[in-house]
Amino acid sequence: MSDTETNKTFTLTNDETGEKYTLPVLEGSEGPPVVDIRKLYAETGHFTFDPSFTATGSCKSRLTFIDGEKGILMHRGYSIEDLASKSSFMEVAYLLLYGDLPNKAQKDKFEHDITYHTMVHEQINFFYRGFRRDAHPMAIMCGVMGGLSAFYHDSLDIYDPEQREISAHRLIAKVATLAAMTHKYTLGQPFMYPRNDLSFAENFLYMTFAVPAEPYKVNPVLASAMDKIFILHADHEQNASTSTVRLAGSSQANPFACIAAGIASLWGPSHGGANQAVLEMLDEIGSKDNIPEYLERAKDKDDPFRLMGFGHRVYKNFDPRANVLKKACDEVLDDLGIDDPRLELAMELERIALEDPYFVDRKLFPNVDFYSGIILKAMGFPTSMFTVLFALARTVGWVSQWKEMIEEPALRIGRPRQLYTGPKSRPYVDLDDRK
């Protein structure tokens, strides 16, 4: 069933009056049933209280399903393992946007449409000059993404299906160009224009690492790993940044502003900065000899040290994305033959932790952030760019979620309620009478 009211109900009883209130129970196509509380206040005079919204369904969605207990992640019914091993990022983007994997003709047209939107207006180059050279890349991304709405007035009518389509394509295409330009700006290197003869991942690597002075050949192993990283980060249900995009979009804000809001939310270290935190943790550990000490500290509840990149807020078993990325991580490190003490330290930490009963029993396995951080470091990305790459990939999910919400007939502006704990009503005291 999909969003179907069952014959099940949820009953509340007023302890003072004995009056009973019955709420309907809904079932989706996957996942647990939900209690429909839309009429709760009108019928009972009560709200629900759910800080962080971890027990609240904020929307209906057909895009992504997660079962954290079983370690399942699906997009439109397809497992993330199948998509990452058999599809390309462009196919997954099409799937999220339109509901099905494309046939050959649809795939070719979609890739063509995205490719020919990768150029950005030449005046956007001047935006970058307003930022300090040492500005954090995410600060730059927030600004230039929001700035796109000043250039593309022909696609801001969110209720025009054709304009929504153009905006979606522009966002998916141009975020890669903006991310590459952000990296170049922080290095003081010239911007590299996109190339239409390259795939999405290849083109991004070219714009990021090529320089005008010499030819640049994209490493196919790195391009494949980059494509997998994009797939694995494309969408992840109603997380903080996706919820931010939906909430901003519910006010009928333009899509560029909504994605800029999502980037701002993703910037937080508890969300998009996790893979950067992995590298910072490795720097703190310092050497292989210190691993046992830090593992013991991680077991101590009174010690503030945490083992970053292990376990997950949602996945209580294992992160299904991690196994896919571990293979890509091994391929990248093997191909590059990098002699980097920090990368060797990461592999040794992984080995020891997976043999420690404390972590195994608690299912604190390496997650996608652990491996993505290692891969991006090996590719040559500075840690400050890690969250930018997350935003690049997640833009596909954000756009798809925004598009789904706008097309919902019952769209209403988001308006969470609160449990007020401030002072009760009190008389105003004139300034001279205040003590």
Image (spheres, grey):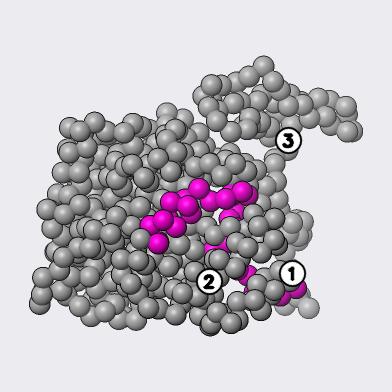
Badge 1 amino acid: Lys
Q: Is residue 75 above or below residue 21?
A: below
Above or below residue 422? Residue 6 is above
- Counting residues from the start of the chain, the first of labels 2 and 1 encountered is 1
Nearer mark to the viewer, of 1 and 3: 1
How far apart marks 2 and 1 lie (CA) works out to 23 Å
Mark 2 residue crowding within 10 angstroms, few (<14) / some (14–19) / many (20+)? some
The answer to whether marks 2 and 3 mark residues whose Cβ atoms lie closer than 8 Å is no
Left or right: 128, with 322 as reference point: left
Q: Quadrant of the C terminus?
A: bottom right
Q: Secondary structure at mark 2?
A: helix
* Marks 2 and 3, the one that precedes in the sequence: 3
At 42% across and 28% down in the image, what residue appears?
409
Left or right of 411: which side holds 336?
left
Image coordinates for residue 384, horizontal then vertical, percent = 39, 73
Residue 304 is covered by the magenta coloring: yes
Task: Identify the residue under disc 2.
Answer: 348
Horizontal and vertical percent position of residue 269: 51, 66
Reading the image, the residue beneath label 3 is 45
Residue under label 1, please give it: 301
Mark 2 or mark 3, whichever is nearer to me: 2
Q: Please tell me whether mark 3 sits on a helix, a strand or a loop.
A: loop
Nearer mark to the viewer, of 2 and 1:
2
Residue 338: x %, y % from top left = 35, 75
Q: Amino acid at mark 2?
A: Glu
